Amino acid sequence: MPAEHMPARRPRRETVTGVPRSARRPPGHAPARSEISEQTTLGHTYVRSLMRSQLRAALYALAGLALLVGSLPLLFALPTALGHGTARPFVWAALGVGAYPVIWLIARWYVRRAERNESDFTGLVEGR
């Protein structure tokens, strides 16, 4: 029989027997949790990873705050440099409308980032 007239062969089915993946580890037990509680090198690495991500978020927030607060003296000197006399209303407007909302946004970003880092770490430890 020519090759184009041969019926297509189905792949052979195989039955796999063994312990299901969900039954391999006891419920509520994740390898990362035991690594951390036993203070192994891998557990130490997990904790250091969390600490590093939290430190990175804190440094970004601190850099944003330093940039904002560091630029305020330049902003306050602007009205006198332009020859507008007293800068008192401008200073209060710059703080109330410019600086404080930005500080609030940086703080909000930092808290959300820290919570996300902790949530990711908890998901890793609990095996989610």
Image (tube, grey):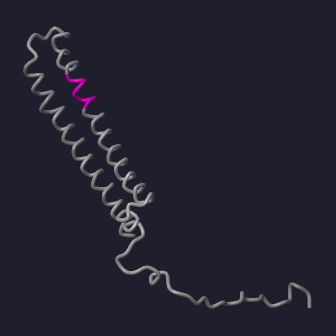
Task: State the image quarter where residue 22 is shown.
Answer: bottom left
Q: Is residue 122 above or below residue 8?
A: above
Give the main secondary structure of the magenta stretch. Answer: helix
Report the quarter where the C terminus lies. bottom left
Q: Name which residue lies at 12% across and 32% down.
A: 96
Front one among 25 and 44: 44
Task: State the image quarter where residue 44 is shown.
Answer: bottom left
**In the drawing, does residue 19 fall left or right of residue 86?**
right
Q: Position of residue 50 (x, y in %)?
A: 36, 53
Q: Name which residue lies at 40% across and 52% down.
A: 49
Q: Is residue 5 above or below residue 100?
A: below
Residue 7 lies in the magenta-colored region? no
Residue 67 lies in the magenta-colored region? yes
Task: State the image quarter where residue 104 is shown.
Answer: top left
Magenta-drawn segment: 66-72
Residue that extends furthest to the top in the rendered view of this protein: 83
Q: Position of residue 48 (x, y in %)?
A: 38, 51
